[in-house]
């Protein structure tokens, strides 16, 4: 009987293990805050993660050209070859000789400040959720007390 044999198990495992058919690339910029365009369409502000599909005939994938554009108007283009199955990061650097560096550095600081504020808000929400799930808060809630502690509301 083939189904109960070790050969059948090996064949089933071989079918389940499929080769990767894509690669991931995360675009970052130096300084931070550039917008990424591919084919004239905005992919958003960095960091941008993009999946690239393989044609199945090669072990590498050539990415499309992307353009990083900073608020000053400075820009650079980029493409690369990605090994199928990889997950890489590309840091696109602003051309050093492009005008408006100070504007782009100030923008990068604003972007960093906004990310830090968003991270702090996420931590506050997480801490509130943890507090509400604590045994003390659950006891207060079970008693139906209108005077819940501030951290249990």
Image (cartoon, grey):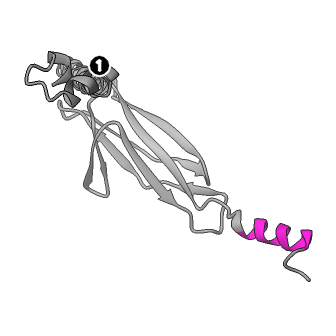
- Which residue is the extreme one toward the left? 146
> What residue is drawn where x is 31% and y is 28%?
133
Say which of 73 and 82 sits in front: 82
Task: Decide whether residue 8 is among the magenta residues.
Answer: yes
> What residue is drawn where x is 84% and y is 78%?
3
Say which of 128 and 80 sits in front: 128
Question: Taken as a whole, is the magenta stretch helix, strand or loop?
Answer: helix
> What residue is drawn where x is 23% and y is 26%?
118
Q: Is residue 29 left or right of residue 57?
A: left
For label 1, the crowd category at 10 Å Cα-Cα, with few meaning under 14, some 14 to 19 and many 20 or more, is: few
Task: Decide whether residue 50 is among the magenta residues.
Answer: no
> Residue 65, position in %: x, y?
40, 52
Q: Quadrant of the N terminus?
A: bottom right
Answer with the quarter of the image where residue 45 lies.
Answer: top left
In the figure, 62 relative to 131: above or below? below
Say which of 145 and 47 sits in front: 145
Boundaries of the magenta span:
5-15
In the figure, 26 relative to 13: above or below? above
Q: How many marks can you see? A: 1
Q: Is residue 69 left or right of residue 144?
A: right
> Residue 126, position in %: x, y?
30, 26
> Residue 105, position in %: x, y?
23, 18
Q: Is residue 5 visible?
A: yes
Answer with the quarter of the image where residue 30 lies.
Answer: top left
Q: Quadrant of the C terminus?
A: top left
The residue indicated by pointer 1 is 136
SS label for mark 1: helix
Q: Is residue 142 left or right of residue 78?
A: left
Answer with the quarter of the image where residue 144 lies.
Answer: top left
> Residue 87, position in %: x, y?
55, 44
């Amino acid at each position: 009987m083939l189904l109960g044999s070790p050969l059948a198990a090996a064949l089933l495992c071989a079918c389940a293990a499929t080769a990767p058919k894509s690669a991931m690339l995360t675009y970052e910029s130096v300084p931070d805050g550039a917008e990424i365009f591919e084919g004239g369409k905005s992919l958003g502000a960095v960091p941008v993660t993009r999946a690239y599909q393989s044609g199945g005939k090669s072990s590498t994938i050539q990415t499309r050209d992307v353009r990083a554009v900073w608020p000053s108007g400075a820009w650079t283009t980029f493409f690369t070859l990605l090994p199928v199955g990889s997950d890489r990061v590309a840091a696109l650097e602003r051309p050093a000789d492009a005008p408006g560096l100070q504007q782009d550095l100030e923008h990068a600081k604003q972007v960093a400040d906004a990310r830090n504020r968003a991270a702090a808000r996420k931590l506050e929400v997480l801490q509130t959720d943890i507090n509400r799930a604590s045994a003390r808060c659950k006891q207060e809630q079970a008693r139906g007390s209108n005077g819940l502690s501030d951290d249990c509301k």
